[in-house]
Image (spheres, rainbow, N blue to C red):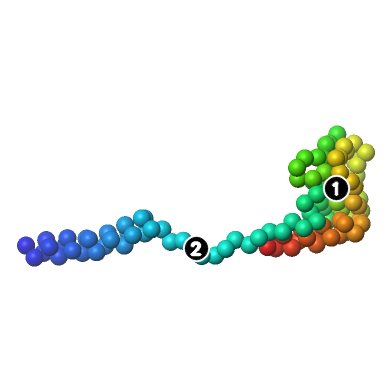
Amino acid sequence: MRKINKVRIFSAIGVLPLLTIFLYPPTSSAVAPTIRPGATSTFGVLAATTITNTGPTVISGTAGGDVGLFPGSSFTGSTTVTMSGTQHIADTLANTAQTDLVTAFND
């Protein structure tokens, strides 16, 4: 009889931690970083070297309708693009947006 009781005790001891894990899963106390879009929030397209458009394209929407390129300056096919924003090719705003994009990506 003692062997049966020992087996039951060991079984209960082995099952208890498993039940605890399933009933109370571990939680992380880490806080997700806040990603700040900065100047990127108005851009539908933001590139670093080249933008290539191959056909009629519309750039608009809630994400923004601006097109930015920095440090590059080659925007091929721009004549067939309809946009709700402004082109910022190798200008100060495109430079700031690129910097903010890298910061947001690294966050």
Would you name the residue on which mark 2 appears? 28
Please rate how many residues cluster around mark 2, counting C-alpha atoms within 10 Å: few if below 14, some from 14 to 19, many from 20: few
Q: Secondary structure at mark 2?
A: loop
Kindly identify the amino acid type of the residue bearing the numbered disc 2.
Ser
Q: Which mark is residue 95?
A: none
Number of numbered discs? 2
**Horizontal and vertical percent position of residue 17:** 31, 62
**Horizontal and vertical percent position of residue 50:** 86, 51
Q: Is residue 36 left or right of residue 32?
A: right
Question: Which residue is drawn at the image coordinates 54% and 65% (left, top)?
Answer: 30
Question: Which residue is drawn at the image coordinates 80% and 62% (left, top)?
Answer: 99
Q: Are marks 1 and 2 in contact (CB under 8 Å)?
A: no
Question: Which residue is drawn at the image coordinates 86% and 44% (left, top)?
Answer: 85
Kindly identify the amino acid type of the residue bearing the numbered disc 1.
Val
Whether residue 34 is situated above or below residue 74 in the rendered picture: below
Q: Quadrant of residue 91?
A: bottom right
Would you name the residue on which mark 1 appears? 67
